[in-house]
Amino acid sequence: MPIKSPMMMRGKRNILMKNKAYDLSSYVFRSGEKILLDTNIWLYLFPAPAGYPKKFVSHYSTAFARLIKAKAQPVLSPIVLSEYLNRYIRIEWQGCYQTKYRDFKNFRKSTDFTQVAASMKVFAQKILQSCQVHDLAANALNLQQSLNEFVMGNIDFNDAVLVDICKQLNFKLMTNDSDFQYGGIEILTTNPTLLNACP
């Protein structure tokens, strides 16, 4: 039996349901409200020392503090944690070690990597301690739909999975990624592209 999709067909073009974006600077969190945080948000909150765009850090750190104060519930997906760890290490390698280790795999086998990973682990543990890991089983995910949307160029595969998780568990997604314009979920962001595209 074919899996139903939120997509509507118009000729060969696939149109996904638009997301609804809320301006995080004025958003009022509610007690018990569940918010899934995207990878880019964790990189703003716990950045790799080699650097990450500074202009969004204060926006999202302030919002996260308000979320906690309101007793809303930050939610973590293992996909997001995996992306955070991989991106953190890549940022450090590209920023500090790429000339010393031309090949990333050689960096991962080095004592320099061990030192970077130790710092990264501290941040990862803070993330785990502050969040509830979502309880949607892997076999409940609509992976075929996520694959279809990825193949058609609508969205990154991991992003499509996060959209599916948010839809099934009624989570809002906090993100600064302008790719999250479609999927029929609610977005919390300060990204003007998202706010303008998803009114």
Image: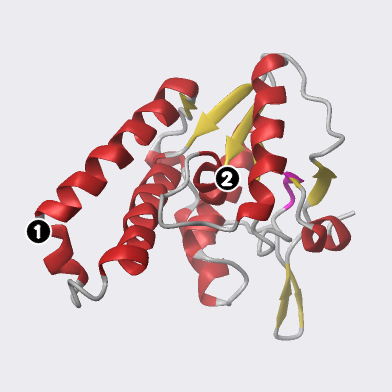
* The C terminus sits in image quarter: bottom right
Q: Residues within 10 Å of mark 1 (few under 14, many from 20)?
A: few
Tell me if 65 is positioned left or right of 80 in this view: right
Q: Can residue 1 be seen here? A: no
Q: Position of residue 176 (x, y in %)?
A: 66, 53
Badge 2 amino acid: Ile
Q: Quadrant of residue 95?
A: bottom left
- What secondary structure is the stretch in magenta mostly built from? strand
User: Mark 1 sits on what residue?
Assistant: 109
Query: Residue at position x 16%, y 59% from top?
Result: 108
User: Mark 2 sits on what residue?
Assistant: 41
Query: Residue at position x 73%, y 15% from top?
Result: 70
Q: Reading the chain from its start, which is encountered first: label 1 or label 2?
A: 2
Q: Position of residue 72 (x, y in %)?
A: 67, 19
Q: Position of residue 1 (x, y in %)?
A: 51, 57
Residue 185 forms part of the magenta stretch: yes
Q: Residues within 10 Å of mark 2 (few under 14, many from 20)?
A: many
Tell me if 108 is positioned left or right of 196 in this view: left
Disc 1 is placed on an element classified as loop
Q: Which residues are magenta?
A: 184-188
Q: Closest to the observer: 145 or 192?
A: 192
Q: Quadrant of residue 60?
A: top right
Badge 1 amino acid: Lys
Residue 199 forms part of the magenta stretch: no
Relative to 77, is 151 above or below?
below
Query: Residue at position x 42%, y 21% from top?
Result: 129
